[in-house]
Amino acid sequence: MPRIAVIPGDGIGIDVTREAVKVLQVVADVTRTTLSLDEFDYGAEKYLATGISLPDADLEKLKAYDAIFIGALGDPRIPDMAHARDILLGTRFKLDLYVNHRPVRCLHERLLPLRGKRPQDVDIVFFRENTEGAYVGIGGIFKKGTPDEIAVQEEVNTRKGVERILRHAFDFARRQGRRSVCMTDKSNALRHGGDLWQRVFKEVGEDYPDVTSFHLFVDALAMQLVRAPENFDVIVANNMFGDILTDLGAALQGGLGMAASGNIHPGRHAMFEPVHGSAPKYAGKDVANPIAAILAAEMMLEHLGLAQAGDLIQRAVVGAIADEQVTKDLGGRLGTRAAGDEIVRRIRALAG
């Protein structure tokens, strides 16, 4: 019986997580699957009341779960986002979730912003290195607040970290029958980290002769993703470039309300989430699009080996979008709850 830890988050994170959990419960019921869903109260309210974000002892509890499902975090009452940083980055780093898996797939032509392209032209999987790069927090500020202020932010790239994310990308491409892996960097300007990425990419690529490998500088890749997304299958990048490019990818699939992600250490731990923010001004107003959270739940089920359940969710979401039974941002008229209910209804109908 898969055990899932649920962290609803803040703002609309709470609203959309509720719908994702509802979908998980129904799809488990119709596929006769037993899921154990345990909710953990980590978020702004608890932090403001107690000053506690995610203690190491509680992180140990989360390690016992087969997967973690987390909603968006962030609250304007905590301007430095200390609790969100502790929970999200803390979990990624302390559980060594080095794979950020971001599928970018356009599910309907109505959502595609590119003229002359078809939905099938946007079917890309991004892998972002998730535990190194510029996000490791190494650096500091000297003479803060003075005219001589200096801010230093270091980027870290290790041979181990670079090789394991590259191998994961190639393994995925081979396993899924995808034809190519593109590695992106800015090695023409950032020579030292770029040199490491370039050398390891070439070495790893030689172990996968059945998968075409090629490189583009990140600025060129951003342009090509808009011009010809159909030319890309799997893209792998460092932490910062992957973060930026996947938001561009989200625009190609209909916006952040469609974007789901997984943070994974293969064979050990995994955490799944929608990638949008907590949007506090919309919290509790029944307007947030729950599809990104629901698709993150689908990713989680597939990771847990529950492919039938994941397929039901995917088909239900595609049908709801096609029939415009969705929230306003996707061209429909439904609220958050009704959009979740519609997907639940379709899952039941598909299951017979």
Image: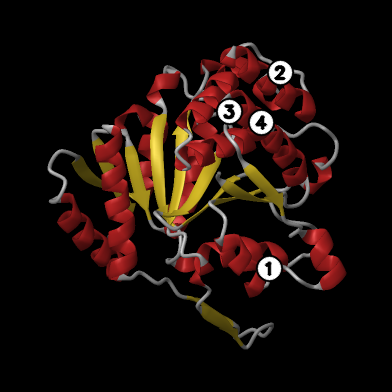
Residue 80 relative to residue 232: left or right = right
Residue 118, picture quadrant: top left
Question: Going from the N terminus, do you reach mark 2 or mark 4 first?
Answer: 4
Hey, what amino acid is under mark 1? Leu
Can residue 7 be seen here? no
Q: Which mark is residue 54?
A: 1
Image height of 165 relative to 155, above or below: above
Contact, mark 4 vs mark 3 (Cβ under 8 Å) = no
Label 1 residue SS: loop
Question: Going from the N terminus, do you reach mark 4 or mark 3 first?
Answer: 4
Q: Nearest the camera: 205 or 49?
A: 49
Hey, what amino acid is under mark 3? Arg
Hey, what amino acid is under mark 4? Val
Question: Going from the N terminus, do you reach mark 4 or mark 1 first?
Answer: 4
Counting from the top left corner in percent of width and height, residue 1 is at 55, 44
Residue at (53% x, 62% y) in the render: 92
Contact, mark 4 vs mark 1 (Cβ under 8 Å) = no
Disc 2 designates what residue?
332
Residue 160 relative to residue 126: left or right = left
Counting from the top left corner in percent of width and height, residue 159 is at 28, 69
